[in-house]
Every structure is written in C-alpha cells, then in structure tokens.
Image: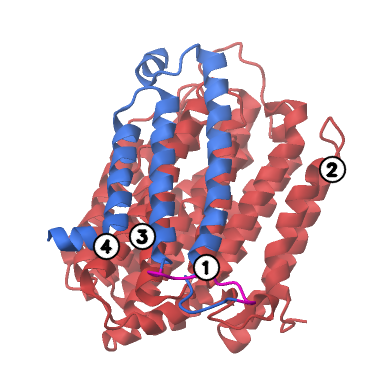
Chain colours: A red, B blue
C-alpha cells in the first residue's frame, strides 16, 4: 500500500474533490458540511501518513502524471521537506474539528458550506505546493492557496475584514507575479520547468538574467512569508480572520514562502550556477530585524490575536535567519522550526479563539482573570506561549538552539545575540499574557459566568498543547529526519 | 545599447508595462484603479512569457500538410492560458471585495477608508 504509486496524485486530488463537493453535499443551513470536511481531512491525513512512511523507507520518490515522463510531463515529488504535509494535514484536521461550533456562531448559516470549501481548497493548494516537482505547477498551487486564503480572511463579515482581505490580496497578487516572472526567466534560460531538470541545465547560463530570476523569486516568497519590511499585510489579515483560519494562515500559509525558498535553494545550490552569499547575507539581516521588530510590536498590542500575528512575523524572522546563515545546524533548525512553529502558533490561535468565543472579548484587559473560569484553555495557551519563547523542554527550544548554534558555526555570533534578544522581548509579552490570565481580577463584577469551550474546541487545543511538549521532549526525531535532506542540499557547497 | 534594446523590444515593452502597473498599484487611492494597475502588471508578465516562445519566421506547431520548421514554442502560450484563468479569478475576488467594502463603508478611496477605521 505504501509504495502504490498513484497514492501521491490521489493525495492532492482528495481534498480538491472534497472541497468542490462540499456545497453539494450539505443543505442550505450548512448541515453535513462539517462531517464531509472532517471525512475528507481524515482520508487525506491517512494518505499523508502512508507517504511519510514511504519516504522514511526509501528516501525521495516521484510520480509521473499522465504517463508523460519528466521533464516533458508534470512530476510530483515527495522528499523530506515534503513531510511538512504531516503538519498541514494535522492542522487542517484540527481546524475543521474546531470549526464545528465556531463556524456556527461566527458565520452566517449560508456561508458555512463555502467556508469548508475554502478551507479544503486551501489544504489542496498547500499540499500541491509541497509535493509538486514542476515550477509552473508551483505557481498554480500557490494561487489556489492564496485565493482561498484571501476569501477566508474576508469571510468573517466583520467591518474591517474586507479591507484587510483586499490589502492582503494586492500584496499577495504582486508577489505571485514576481514569482511567475522568476519562473518565466528560469524557463527562458533552461527551456524546462521541471525543478530537477532546471537544476541540471542552469550551469553556464548568463549571470544577469539568473540573478534577476532568483531576485524575483526571493522577493515574491518574502512577501508571502511576511518578512520585515514586507509584512504590513499580515497583522490585519491574521487578526481579523476567524480563529481556525488564523491558525491555518499563521501556521501554514506563511510557510509557503519558506518552503518556496527551500525549493529555490535546492535549485541554486544544486546547479552551482550562482553564488547566493549576497542573498544569504541580506536574508540573515532581514531575518534578524524581523525577529526584533515583530517581537517589539507584539509587546505593545492589547488585542490578543494582533499580538499573535506580530509574533508570527518574529518567528518567520528566526526561520529566514536560519536559512540565510546557510550552515548545516541553522538550516536544520530553520526547517524544524517550520514544523514546530506551525504547531505552536496553531495552539495559540485556536486557544485564543476558544477564549474569545467563550468570553466575547479579545483584549488582554478584557480577558483578565480568565484563568479561573477556563483553566484548561489558558493552560494550553500558556504552554504555547512558553514554546514560542523557547524555554526547554518545549518545541520552540530546540529549533532556536539549533539556529543559534548555526550562527556560531557560520562565524556570526552577533546573530545569535539578536536571536536571544528577540526571545527576551517575546518573554515580555508572554509574561503580560500570563499575568492577565491568572493574576488580575476580572474587570467587571457582573460579567456573565464563562465556562470551558465545547469539546470540539477544547480537544484540538489540548492535543496541540500536548504536541508542543512532546515535540520538545522527542526533539531528536524531526531533527534526525530532516538531516539527510539538509546534507543533500548543502553537499554541492563542499561538505558544508 | 540601442541595438540591444531594439532587438529585445518585446521584453523592454513588458518591463515598461510592468512598471506602469506597479506605479498605479502604489500611488492610486481608488481601490478599483489600484486593481487595474495590478491587471496591467499581470498582462506585462503574460506578454513577457508568451514572447519567450516566439521564433522569427516560425510556424504554428500543428501537424499535417504544410507543417514546416521552424515551429514556435507552444508551451508558454499554454502556461499563460492557465495564468489568465488565475488572473480572472483574482480579479473576480477583488471586485467582489470592493463591492462589499463600498456597501459597508460607503467609499472605496483608500485614504477615506483609513480614516473610517
């Protein structure tokens, strides 16, 4: 079963078909759409499990779509970086479960089936983006992902939601065009769109168009991942969206830029046609600035979701800095932080969503003293917050440790200092949050008694919080899993 | 320099078009004009990629009688068909967002919207 070849293409098609059929399956008031979306996500997750087992067994493998052999046809490729689909499926599944009660209260009934359609389409785009081996397909899946994300931001119907979505759309569309331009240039240089084939043919191309191509790709992916100073769309969009959507956007959608950069690096390092040290230096600096600025802005937010949105910018900074340092340790740390940050940020956003849903308040002042009435949710959010600071033994610690080690390895201890400084700032807002939850009195004496969220909201939050701890304790597992991929990536640079 | 520009007039034109679009996206206040700028940018990129496939004096790559080399490259055109579909869906989504913004706020000028927030 695990080596059955068409599984890889079915893996992309299942959520797509599920998405398109959701409005047909459910009735006008949105009944049955939740069950349908849940079933689709369960099936997709099972496939992800089987595919990851296979990559563990035999390393990277690919599937040729329609019998047209690469480089002429479209190739789907699954390697160690593709194992990110595990987190994609897990978060997708939990976001769907979480949405059961949330969507019913937050959205108009007529919109519920379309909400699940968009969520599943988003998953399709994500999965397709991760497993495709073809540059143009990469663009198409990225657009499926982005378009559904813009619509999901707007779906909440809040007053500023459409404006946030429009801002996101304009930035997103410009960055997509930049990426398409880069893909076009690579095609012009090599006459091929298959990534492995492009890598093989790039050597000896003219330098100027090559630099332009990589610059356009990097610029596009940096906007997608909201790296400072191209982050301005992120806080509004992520704070306004419904909470399960925020979790997916912050945990997964911004990672598209990072995974795209990893693909670009695979091409650039593999072909050896271009020296990326200038780009790396820029990414390292922008990453360091992102860490500090994101954390700095987060400290001053009173709105809990706004705070989490800024902390995403800071964490993207960690990952990009890890990529830019380009030493084995920092790359391993960055790749694993892509996984772990997704888990942590989903814990935080879903937990915050549960708090907001139950209390009707979204500011830290308004949420004062909530730890007494909703102990489980606040405990989960606190675990998420510890992880994001990077205190052992939680998931955030190991990756940041590895990135710091990588900075030392690359001979740039200054960036390790930036990393620690960012973590200190993050610690400040963590303290603010815990202080508000546990140590302050509820503001109004006559506030309605709140209690824990329904099980469909509580259980995903608790599962994610538990995973934050488990990933901290079993940290070796993802590290050793990603290591061969990083070694292969850096091999052309001469041992690394 | 001029010769180089003249030989690559198609690429130069799409770059100019791209910059015009980017200028409109950045400077225009009206959301629809902003989006028209984005459409111009899209067109510029599409024109650039289609121009990649052109061969001087080339024929359409269709088999049958009268098929003679050199053929032009059909792949970029096929890609851009997909690209146009993406661009149309983006436009549809953006316009529907603009309609909803107008219904909610009564204006689609970016500066007035900022004040309303």
Q: Does residue A137 appear left or right of residue A28 in this picture?
A: left
Q: Is residue A376 magenta?
A: no
- Mark 4–mark 3 Cα distance, whole angstroms, equals 9 Å
Residue picked out by circle 3: A217
Q: Which residue is mark 4?
A: A212
Residue at the spot 61% in from the left edge and 50% down from the top edge: A122
Name which quarter of the figure residue A270 lies in: bottom left
Q: Earlier in the sequence, mark 2 or mark 4?
A: 2
Circle nearer the N terminus (4, 3): 4
For the point 73% across and 46% down, the residue is A97
Q: Which residue is mark 1?
A: B74
Is label 4 or label 3 in front?
4
Label 3 vs 2, first from the N-terminus: 2
Left or right of A264 in this view: A347: right
Q: Nearer the viewer, mark 2 or mark 4?
A: 4
Instruction: For marks 2 and 4, give the CA distance.
Output: 46 Å
Q: Between label 3 and label 1, give the one nearer the viewer.
A: 1
Looking at this view, name the residue that lies furthest to the left: B1
CA separation in Å, label 3 and label 2: 38 Å
In three-dimensional space, the C-alpha distance between marks 1 and 4, rounded to whole angstroms, equals: 24 Å
The residue pinned by badge 2 equals: A24
């Amino acid at each position: 079963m695990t080596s059955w070849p068409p599984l890889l293409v079915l893996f992309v098609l299942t959520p797509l078909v599920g998405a398109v059929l959701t409005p047909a399956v459910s009735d006008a008031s949105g009944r049955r759409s939740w069950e349908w979306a849940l079933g689709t996500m369960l099936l997709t997750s099972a496939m992800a499990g089987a595919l990851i087992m296979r990559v563990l067994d035999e390393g990277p493998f690919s599937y040729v779509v329609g019998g047209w052999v690469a480089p002429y046809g479209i190739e789907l490729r699954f390697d160690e970086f593709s194992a990110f689909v595990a987190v994609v499926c897990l978060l997708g599944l939990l976001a769907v479960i979480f949405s059961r009660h949330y969507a019913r209260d937050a959205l108009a009934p007529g919109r519920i089936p379309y909400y699940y359609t968009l969520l599943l389409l988003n998953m399709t785009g994500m999965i397709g983006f991760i497993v495709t081996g073809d540059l143009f397909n990469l663009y198409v899946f990225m657009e499926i992902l982005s378009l559904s994300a813009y619509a999901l931001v707007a779906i909440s119907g809040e007053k500023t939601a459409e404006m946030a979505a429009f801002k996101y759309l304009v930035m997103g569309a410009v960055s997509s065009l930049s990426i398409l331009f880069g893909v076009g240039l690579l095609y012009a240089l090599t006459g091929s769109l298959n990534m492995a084939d492009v890598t093989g043919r790039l050597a000896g191309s003219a330098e100027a168009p090559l630099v332009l191509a990589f610059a356009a790709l990097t610029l596009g992916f940096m906007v997608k991942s909201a790296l400072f100073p191209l982050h301005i769309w992120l806080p509004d969009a992520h704070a306004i969206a419904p909470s399960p959507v925020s979790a997916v956007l912050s945990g997964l959608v911004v990672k598209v830029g990072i995974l795209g950069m990893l693909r670009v690096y695979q091409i650039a390092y593999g072909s050896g046609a271009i020296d990326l040290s200038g780009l790396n230096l820029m990414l390292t600096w922008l990453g360091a600035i992102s860490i500090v600025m994101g954390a700095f802005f987060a400290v001053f937010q009173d709105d809990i979701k706004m705070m989490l949105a800024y902390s995403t910018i800071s964490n993207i900074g960690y990952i990009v800095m890890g990529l830019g340092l380009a030493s084995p340790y920092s790359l391993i740390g960055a790749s694993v932080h892509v996984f772990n940050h997704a888990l942590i940020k989903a814990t935080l956003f879903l937990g915050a969503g549960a708090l907001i849903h139950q209390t009707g308040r979204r500011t830290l002042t308004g949420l004062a003293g909530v730890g007494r009435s909703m102990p489980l949710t606040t405990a989960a959010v606190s675990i998420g917050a510890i992880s994001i600071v990077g205190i052992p033994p939680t998931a955030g610690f190991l990756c940041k440790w590895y990135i710091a080690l990588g900075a030392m390895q690359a001979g740039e201890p200054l960036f390790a200092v930036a990393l620690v400084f960012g973590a200190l700032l993050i610690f400040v807002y963590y303290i603010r949050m815990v202080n508000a939850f546990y140590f302050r009195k509820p503001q109004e004496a006559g506030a309605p008694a709140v209690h824990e969220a329904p099980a469909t909201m509580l259980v995903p939050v608790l599962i994610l919080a538990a995973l934050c701890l488990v990933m901290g304790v079993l940290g070796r597992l993802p590290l050793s899993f990603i290591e061969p991929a990083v070694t292969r990536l850096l091999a052309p640079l001469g041992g690394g | 320099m001029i010769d180089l520009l003249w030989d690559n007039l198609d690429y130069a034109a799409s770059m100019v078009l791209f910059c015009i679009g980017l200028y409109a996206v950045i400077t225009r206040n009206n959301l629809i004009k902003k989006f028209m700028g984005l459409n111009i940018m899209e067109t510029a990129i599409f024109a650039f990629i289609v121009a990649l496939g052109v061969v001087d004096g080339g024929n359409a790559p269709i088999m049958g009688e009268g098929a003679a080399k050199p053929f032009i490259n059909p792949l970029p055109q096929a890609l851009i068909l997909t690209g146009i579909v993406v661009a149309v869906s983006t436009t549809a989504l953006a316009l529907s967002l603009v309609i909803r913004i107008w219904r909610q706020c009564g204006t689609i000028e970016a500066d007035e919207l900022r004040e309303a927030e």
